Amino acid sequence: MNIQNLFPSCSDLLLFEKSPIADYTDLGKCDFVYLTSDKKLLLIETKFIDTTASGATERKRRNKHRNKVFEQVRTLKKRFSQYWNIQVGELECGVFTTDSEIDWRGNDVNVATKSVSIRKLEEWRVAMGALNQT
């Protein structure tokens, strides 16, 4: 997966699946932290959202997952800012999911959003599996 295709400003991966505050995972873990080309930090949260299931319960579940991923990344932004004394303007947020419904939601909360279909994600997994076997 080429991160620049999804989030073009990413230049260097700094953290992967780590807590922003030492090893205090009870305070949350950030899926990815990238240094951007303009020397800011981009915090990216990922979430698999099942878009194939139907029914009222599944719609509620999807909406809960959508809200949660945005809440997670905004909370992590605050924690990074407070703990590391980083100005909020130096931190950016991103969300990556398998649900295209999130694409417009980030505009109101200043979060970059990207999504791919579940089918595309499965294609990436197969390709990555093939690469790992070589």
Image (tube, helix red, strand yellow):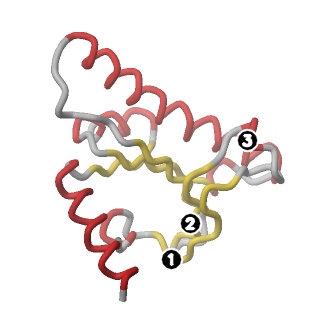
Q: Which quarter of the rendered picture does the C terminus lie within? A: bottom left
Q: Which residue in the structure is indicated by mark 2?
A: 34
Secondary structure at badge 2 equals strand
Circle 2 crowding by C-alpha within 10 Å: few under 14, some 14–19, many from 20: many
Secondary structure state at the residue bearing disc 1: strand
Answer few, some or many: residues within 10 Å of disc 3's Cα (few below 14, many 20 plus, some between 14 and 19): some
Query: Label 1 belongs to which residue?
Result: 11
The residues bearing labels 3 and 1 have C-alpha atoms spaced at a distance of 22 Å
Residue 96: x %, y % from top left = 38, 49
- Identify the residue at the far bottom of this view: 134
At a point 30% along the width and 78% down the height, the residue shown is 130
Q: Depth check: 72 or 128 in front?
A: 128
Q: Is residue 100 left or right of residue 45?
A: left
| Amino acid under disc 3 | Arg
For the residue marked with disc 2, what is the amino acid?
Answer: Tyr
Quadrant containing the N terminus is bottom left
Separation of residues labelled 2 and 3 (CA atoms)? 16 Å
Q: Looking at the picture, how far across and down is residue 64, in whole percent?
A: 40, 21
